[in-house]
Amino acid sequence: MKRIGIMTTGGDCSGLNTAIQRLMRGAHLRGWRVFGIIDGTDGLCTKPVNAIELTEDMLPIENARLAGSFLHNGHSGALNFETAAREGSLQAFEQKIYKSLGELKLDALIAIGGNGSLSLAWEHRDVYRNVQLICIPKTIDMDIPLTDRTIGFDTAVEQLTRFCDQLMLTARSHHRWFVVQSMGRDCGQLALNAGVAVGATAVLIPEIKFNVDSLIKHILNAPTDYGVIVVAEGISLRGHSGRPADMISRQLTAAGIPNRTAFPEHTQRAGDTTASDRLLATAMADAALNAIENNETYVMTALQNGAVKTVSLSDFANAGESVVDPNIPDLKTSNAYVSLDDPLLDIAHNMGIYIGEIK
C-alpha cells in the first residue's frame, strides 16, 4: 500500500481544495493512504511532523469548491526556504525536511505550488531523493512556463472581472474613471484577461511599454466619459513612486480626468472555484496520481493543447525566463510572461482598449 503526502505552498488561491480532495479520492480508490502536511514545509520541521491522515469526511466534496487551502500554506513565522536562508540555517532546514519525509514513510510527495515553489523543488531536489516528487502548478499570476493554465487563474480572472463590473456601474453614475490595480507580480496575464473581459478602456501590463500622454489622449477620446482602467501591480512609471494605480491616478487628475483608485487585493485569490478551475484541478490530480503509478519523479503536471500531461522539472526550469530571487541566495526562478504574440493583445487593440505602445 502506497503512502503519499500532499502539501500546498506559496500563496493561496481557489482550486487548492479541489485538487486536494480529488487527489485524496483518487488515491483512496487505488488503495493508498494519504497524508496532508500542514503549513507547507513548516509542517515538516515540527516535532512531531505536523501531518494528518486524510479521510473522506475531513474534506467533503461539497467543500472542495471553497477557496484557500484546507492544509494551509504557512503563516508569518513559518519555516520555509526563504526564512531558513535569511536565518542562515538552510542546510539544517533541508536535513529536517529529508528526515521528516523518512519518518512519514512516504512513497511520493505531491507539492502544489507556484513558480517559486517549483523552482525551489528543482533547485533542492536532493532533499526529495527518497520519494517520488510530483508538482502541480497553481497561481493566479499564470507565470509558470510549459503549461497553458494554472490552477486558480481562471477564478482570479472571474473575481477581478466581477469587481470591475460593479465599479463600472458607479463610474457611469458619476461620470468618472476607476483605476483598478490587479495582482500578478511581474506578469500581466491577470490584468490583461480581466481587462478584456470587462471591456476596460485601458490595460497596462509590465510586458508592454506605455506612454502616459497616449493613455490620457485615449481616455479623452473614448466614446464614454466613464470606465475602468486596469493596471497590473508590476508596472513602473519613470520618475514616480508609490502604488502603480496611485501613480496613474495622479497623472489622470493632473490632466483633468476625474477618477478614483480601487484595490481588489486578496479578493482576487478568493471566491468559489469556477468550473474550469475545478476541471483543471481534477485533471491535474489524475495526472499526478498516474505519474506515481508510472514511477515518475521530479515532474510537473501541465495543460498543453487541451490535455494534461507531465513534464520534467528540469524542462520547467529551463523553459522560462530565469530571474534571480532576491530572498534566497543562488535561486533562479523560472518565469513566464505575456508574449508579444499573444492573440489577446490584438483582440484588445481591435476592441479599442489602450494596451500600450504595441501598434
Image: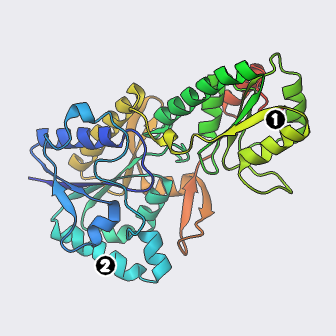
Q: Residues within 10 Å of mark 1 (few under 14, many from 20)?
A: few
SS at badge 2 = helix
Residue 147 can be seen, yes or no = no
Judge whether 344 appears above or below 261 on screen.
above
Q: Residue at x 49, y 58 (%)?
A: 116
Give residue 83's position: percent from left, percent from top: 45, 73
Label disc, if present, on residue 95 of the rendered structure: 2
Residue 65 position by quadrant: top left
Secondary structure type for disc 1: loop
Residue occupying image coordinates x 43% and y 70%: 81
The quarter in which the C terminus is drawn is: top right
Q: Amino acid at mark 1?
A: Ile
Q: Amino acid at mark 2?
A: Gln
Distance of label 1 from label 2 (alpha carbons): 49 Å
- Residue 91 lies in quadrant: bottom left
Residue 202 position by quadrant: top right
Comparing 324 with 299, the one in front is 324
Residue at (21% x, 74% y) in the render: 47
Which numbered dot is residue 298? none
Mark 1 in CB contact with mark 2 (< 8 angstroms): no
Q: Is residue 231 above or below residue 351?
A: below
In the rendered image, the residue lying farthest to the front is 174
Left or right of 28 in this view: 351: right
Residue 283 in percent (x, y) is at 33, 34
Q: Position of residue 217 (x, y in %)?
A: 90, 30
Determine which residue is flagged by label 1. Answer: 358
| Color encoding of the figure | rainbow
